[in-house]
Image (spheres, rainbow, N blue to C red):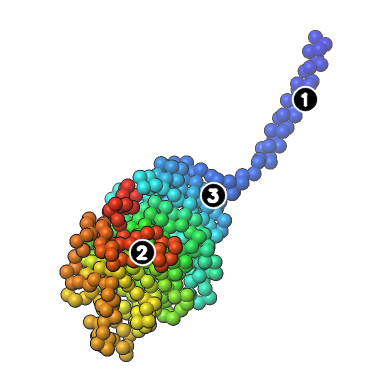
């Protein structure tokens, strides 16, 4: 009994200590590390509030999430997305859903051919303009005044800088659908928008389907891209401006028959055609398939005529395009503005090793500014037509694909007269054939790209 009496105070004392410690823990809980990876539960919403509390969010394989409103990642923040993830826009949220990766932030979204990462509409009957799109903003050079510019879509986001090797992360096997919601009366989201993105960023196997504006647009930057598919964009399939100097290879663009505008719309700078760095991408293994019945215009909800165009080079852009097949558009390739025509004549704007077909003799056209050197829109320049004297270009007015092309965009054509892109730059892969897809190695298969 005496021993028992001695034990009681010790036990009571221990209980008091433990209780006291518990109370201290409640008052001073272990702080949550905002930089620790936070795994978002399946079905949860991706919101701007989420990134006010977490700096690194992970979306796990096979799960479905909701994108609610505009979500902008800031300096030092990351989002990791695993293969097979689906992200749907909130169907009732009045604010446009979009995902913007700001300067200094990163996205690492890596899917596979059979388990792509898909961003799509959350509506029961989806259509273009249901949500915004994906925007990457970096610190690579752009040719705007001061070398920076406000994001076309982001709120209080400025992109551009001097770091050509800036790294915004990785997008691989990612598809966006039904993008293009209006940001304002004059601005609509693209499927993928790259603003001042550096070449430390990896862009491969990206697909844009039924977007309300452009499928892909580059605003300056140095980023490179391989294996791109754009189907059914209501404005341009591909677009660049503000001094994009990157490279692209294995590129497919297919217009729909409802609304569409241009296969490529290419500018240097609208306000200064001589702004540097010049827009000057190098593109290899490109297929553009158009429509002669699609309505055109900047607003897909109120389109104008049916006069689609394969490529519009304008406002001082430069470019080097090889191994190109283009057909099916109402109009072919046009060079607009004297500043761009100068680039054509000195060789800094070139299209070679190409099959180009458009109806009614409109394969090549020139549209100078007032007082320009070209006599008329038919392409007369002192009796010569500089596009057509390029021996490696096969120009026809049949407006059909070459015999070797099947399923609209697949197939080698005229390998003997194509160039090996690796001779242009070591970044390129072997692709000594005209067109984008070798049927013996069909990189569009597997279900990641939607046709």
Please state which of residues 161 and 51 is positioned toward the viewer in this rendering.
161
What residue sits 72% from the left and 29% below the top? 18
Give the number of marks.
3
Residue 227 point in image, percent of width and height: 37, 57
**Would you call the spot at circle 3 few (<14 residues within 10 Å), some (14-19), or many (20 or more)?**
many
Q: On the picture, is 57 further left or further right than 13?
A: left
Earlier-in-chain disc, 1 versus 2: 1
Q: Relative to 364, does residue 442 appear above or below in the rendering?
A: above
Please state which of residues 117 and 205 is positioned toward the viewer in this rendering.
205
Per the rendering, the mark at residue 56 is 3
Q: Which residue is mark 1?
A: 13
Task: Give the mark toward the camera: 3 or 1.
Answer: 3
- Locate the N terminus by quadrant: top right
Residue 401 point in image, percent of width and height: 21, 63
Residue 158 in sight in this render: no
Residue 377 point in image, percent of width and height: 24, 82
Earlier-in-chain disc, 3 versus 2: 3
Q: Relative to 383, does residue 350 appear above or below in the rendering?
A: above
**Would you call the spot at circle 2 few (<14 residues within 10 Å), some (14-19), or many (20 or more)?**
some
**Would you call the spot at circle 1 few (<14 residues within 10 Å), some (14-19), or many (20 or more)?**
few
Could you say whether the residue bearing mark 2 is in a helix, strand or loop?
loop
Q: On the picture, is 247 further left or further right than 138?
A: left
What residue sits 36% from the left and 76% below the top? 349
Inter-mark Cα distance, 3 to 2 = 42 Å
Inter-mark Cα distance, 3 to 1 = 44 Å
Q: Which residue is mark 2?
A: 420
Task: Give the mark toward the camera: 3 or 2.
Answer: 2
Inter-mark Cα distance, 1 to 2 = 83 Å
Q: Are marks 3 and 1 in contact (CB under 8 Å)?
A: no
- Locate the C terminus by quadrant: bottom left
């Amino acid at each position: 009994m005496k021993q028992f009496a001695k034990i009681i105070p010790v036990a009571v004392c221990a209980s008091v200590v433990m209780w006291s410690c518990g109370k201290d823990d409640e008052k001073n809980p272990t702080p949550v590390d905002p930089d620790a990876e936070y795994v978002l539960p399946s079905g949860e919403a991706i919101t701007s509030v989420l990134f006010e509390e977490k700096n690194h969010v992970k979306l796990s394989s096979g799960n479905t999430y909701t994108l609610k409103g505009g979500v902008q990642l800031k300096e030092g923040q990351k989002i990791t997305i695993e293969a097979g993830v689906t992200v749907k826009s909130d169907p009732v949220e009045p604010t446009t859903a979009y995902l913007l990766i700001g300067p200094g932030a990163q996205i690492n979204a890596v899917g596979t051919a059979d388990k792509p990462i898909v961003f799509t509409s959350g509506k029961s009957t989806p259509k273009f303009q249901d949500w915004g799109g994906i925007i990457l903003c970096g610190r690579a050079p752009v040719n705007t005044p001061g070398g920076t510019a406000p994001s076309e879509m982001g709120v209080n986001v400025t992109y551009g800088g001097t770091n050509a090797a800036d790294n915004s992360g990785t997008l691989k096997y990612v598809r966006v659908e039904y993008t293009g919601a209006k940001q304002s009366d004059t601005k609509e989201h693209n499927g993928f928008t790259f603003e001042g993105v550096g070449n430390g960023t990896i862009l491969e196997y990206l697909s844009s389907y039924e977007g309300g504006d452009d499928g892909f647009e580059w605003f300056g930057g140095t980023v490179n891209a391989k294996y791109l598919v754009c189907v059914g964009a209501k404005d341009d399939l591909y677009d660049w401006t503000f001094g994009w100097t990157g490279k692209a290879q294995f590129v497919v663009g297919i217009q729909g028959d409802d609304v569409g505008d241009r296969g490529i719309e290419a500018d240097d700078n609208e306000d200064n055609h001589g702004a540097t760095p010049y827009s000057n991408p190098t593109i290899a293994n490109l297929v553009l398939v158009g429509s002669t019945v699609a309505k055109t215009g900047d607003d897909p909800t109120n389109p104008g005529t049916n006069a689609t165009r394969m490529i519009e080079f304008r406002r001082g852009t430069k470019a080097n395009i090889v191994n190109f097949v283009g057909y099916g558009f109402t109009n072919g390739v046009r060079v607009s503005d004297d500043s761009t025509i100068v680039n054509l004549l000195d060789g800094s704007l070139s299209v070679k090793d190409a099959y180009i077909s458009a109806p009614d003799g409109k394969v090549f056209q020139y549209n100078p500014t007032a007082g320009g050197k070209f006599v008329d829109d038919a392409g007369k320049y002192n009796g010569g037509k500089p596009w057509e004297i390029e021996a490696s270009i096969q120009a026809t007015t049949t407006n059909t694909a070459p015999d070797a092309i099947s399923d609209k965009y697949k197939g080698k054509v005229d390998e003997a007269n194509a160039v090996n892109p690796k001779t242009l730059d070591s970044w390129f892969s072997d692709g000594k054939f005209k067109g984008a897809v070798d049927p013996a190695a069909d990189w569009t298969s597997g279900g990641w790209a939607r046709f």
